[in-house]
Each structure stands twice: as structure tokens, then as C-alpha cells.
Amino acid sequence: VQLQASGGGSVQTGDSLRVSCTASSHSFKRGTMGWFRQAPGKEREFVAAGCRGDYYGDSVKGRFAISRDNARTTVYLQMNSLKPEDTAVYYCAADDRCFSTRSYYFQRSQYYYWGQGTQVTVSS
């Protein structure tokens, strides 16, 4: 199973960008898909994920939106009002399980599959 992320790039403060991630298998159709990010010198942090509802990290709440296509094998992250602190490599993550425990969505260790990452750079 592979997760292929795309859509990263370089933008200015206040711009919008959408990244997407497509799974090579339909096994995630009923599972959890989401995004984490990692800035240089920092730990990988939760951004957004969904299955039984959508969940967001505090730093992106109200600016980012996660969604999935009808086949539920592609997950999108619409990023609005981007800030320089959003600069990071964005990683797609997925698991066959649809998490029923809220805290699982926020934990890297709960996701079995990871994509290669796509760079997002926001300039001031």
C-alpha cells in the first residue's frame, strides 16, 4: 500500500494551498486518513485527520479543512490564511481502522501507513 502526496509548494503569507494524498489501495475506504507536519528541528505534529468526524490541531483550527473524495481513497487538506509558521513537510498518514477513540487521531503511533511528504513553504 502506498500513499502518494502532492500539491505542496511555495506561497506568500495569507495565500491558500491544497495538498492531496491518494492511497493505492481501497483498504482505507472505511479507515482513517489525515495529515501531520514536521518543520526543521521540530517533532512531527498532528495537523488534521478524519473518519468518525474531523479533527484539527489547535494551530490550524479555523484555517485548514480536511476532506475526502467520494471513493474515500484520496484525502485533501485545504490550507487557508497560511502563515510562515505553517512551513513544514506535510505527511499523509492512514490506517485501516476508523478510530473510535478521539485521542487516537492525534497520535502518530496509531497510523500504520505514511506517505513520502510534500514541502510547503510560506514566505512573509
Image (spheres, rainbow, N blue to C red):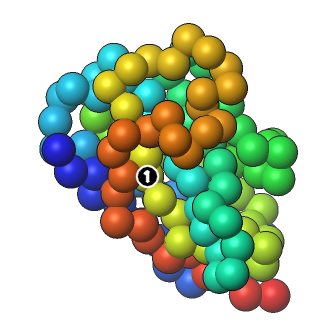
Q: Residue at x 82, y 53 (%)?
A: 59
Q: On the image, numbered disc 1 is attached to which residue?
A: 92
Residue 97 or 74: which is nearer the viewer? 97
Residue 12 percent coordinates (x, y): 71, 82
x then y, percent, for residue 44: 62, 61
Q: Position of residue 70 (x, y in %)?
A: 32, 25
* SS of the residue under disc 1: strand
Q: Nearer the viewer, residue 41 or 77?
A: 41
Q: Is residue 18 above or below residue 10?
A: above
Q: Is residue 107 visible?
A: yes
Residue under the point 25% across and 43% down: 23
* Vertical arrangement, residue 55 with respect to residue 91, above or below: above
Could you tell me which quadrant the N terminus lies in? top left
Give the camera-side residue of 14 and 46. 46
Question: Residue at left 56%, top 36%?
Answer: 49
Q: Note whether 39 is above or below 5 in the view shown.
A: below
In the image, taking residue 1 as reference, residue 88 lies left or right, namely: right
Q: At x 77% / y 62%, what residue is drawn?
A: 81
Q: What amino acid is found at the position of numbered circle 1 in the picture?
A: Cys
Mark 1 Cα shell of 10 Å, populated few (<14), some (14-19), many (≥20)? many
Where residue 40 sits: x, y (%)?
65, 82
| Numbered label tally | 1
- The quadrant of the picture occupied by the C terminus is bottom right
Task: Look at the image and tell me whether residue 22 can be seen.
Answer: no
